[in-house]
Amino acid sequence: MNPGTKDLNLEEIFDNIRYLIKKEQKNLVLNIIADLHPADIAELMSHLDDDERRFIFNLLPSEISHEVLVELEENVKEDVLEGMDTSQIAEMVNEMDSDDAADLVSDLSAEQATEVLEKVEDESSEEIQELLLYPEDTAGGLMAKEYVAVNADMTEKDAIEEIRKKHQDVEDLYYCFVTDDFGTLLGTVSLRDLILAEPNTKIRDIMKQDIISIDSDMDQEEVAKIFKKYDLVVAPVVNKRHKLIGRITIDDVVDVIDEEIEEDLGRIAGTGEEEILEDSVLEISRSRLPWLFISFFGEMVSALILKSFSATMEQIVATAFFIPLVMATGGSAGQQSSIIVVRGLGTGEIGLKDTRRRLKREFFVALLNGAVLAALIFLLVVILLNDYAFGTLLSITLITIIMNATIFGAVIPLFFKKINIDPALATGPFVATFNDIIGLMIYFILLTAGMKFFL
């Protein structure tokens, strides 16, 4: 790759690329993208239309095309694969690491997947079929079958020779995993220790046994937490009998973190798992509409509450003026609380054992924030309406609404976590709508009751 590629502004060449594609200047297009990193080519393709993407991809040499395919977003990858036959796909699969190859095959139709697996090398086909048995969001679905394992009774010289044999299959080698005669994981030995050891030194004598291993059925979020907690770059994957079956590297974990963040943000925003680069209007609408239905029916309930308290609004017209202010403030407090809890649950910084401490903390935060904002709304009512009684009543109502919204925002994600439902589901339109309903009820019940004593 050209040393200056990383500093290249891809936006500067988009127009040129489009122009050259339109003129079908294949050689000139290839000259532009020849020195780009596969990730840069993938980014470039994401901003082009379907025909332009296929035009560029068909120009790529076979040793580069599979790397670019791995970097593409899912919907862009689907567009590119749509114009390829199974022989072309099989050729790229043969060049990929087993985990990337399994991901690609899993995206194909059952018929295409069968044809591709028949055309790839036997060893690759077996590895891919083994990986496809694991759910996509588990450690087994993340792992690659390319790794170097040495027997504990090998010498340093034998281990070095084993590395030489596997060097083409395992590009990024950080550790050699150490196993016994039955394939059971015993530990690891670093390249540094291998280089410094004498040729006849037994691997057993220089290996480290305090190794962090990953169970094949572990959820990918838990895998990411372990990598973060122990600052891992690579980790071995074992089955239920603790036999070594694969490895996970940090680049796969980074992809998991990105995926989980996008998924959680989508749920918080009420867009589900919508792809940012999704082009289909129907697909985008399908992912957003269910959440809008929740908001729609929730706000219908809010409208009925407003109608049932119309007498209160007629008696004190000012109550209607302050509804948006009070509701928005309560909703914002609830969203702040719920998002903090969801983020903490996602990173592992908050657990179910912290429920009591978390609720106590949120109670006092809500009390303090509510008191400050209540003082402000009291001053506002006094200045605008010169009504101390209504200002006092409105202040009490605002504190109550903020405390309710804050506690509710913290409780719901913790409740979802306890019943093994993704807490991110609780922070979208569901929380906002529910806070509107409960907030309006609190608002009018307290104002209606307070009129008898204060007004």
Image: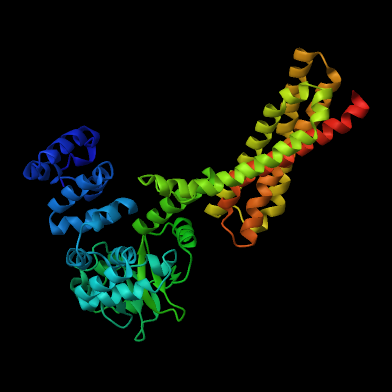
Task: From the viewer's perspective, tell me whether residue 153 is left or right of residue 410.
Answer: left
Identify the residue at horizontal 81%, vertical 13% (top origin).
386
Task: From the viewer's perspective, tell me whether residue 247 is left or right of residue 260.
Answer: left
| Whole-percent x, y for residue 372 in the image | 72, 27
| Whole-percent x, y for residue 298 in the image | 66, 43
Identify the residue at horizontal 41%, vertical 71% (top origin).
134
Tell which residue pokes out farthest to the right in this image.
453
Asked if 368 appears above or below 385 in the picture, the reply is: below
Tell which residue pokes out farthest to the left in this image.
27
Answer yes or no: is residue 147 visible: no
The number of callouts visible is 0
Task: From the viewer's perspective, tell me whether residue 239 is left or right of residue 429.
Answer: left
Q: Quadrant of the C terminus?
A: top right
Q: How is the image coloured?
A: rainbow
Tell which residue pokes out farthest to the bottom in this image.
181
| Whole-percent x, y for residue 383 in the image | 76, 13
| Residue 113: quarter of image | bottom left
| Whole-percent x, y for residue 357 in the image | 70, 50
Identify the residue at horizontal 61%, vertical 40% (top origin).
335
Who is closer to the viewer here, 180 or 279?
279
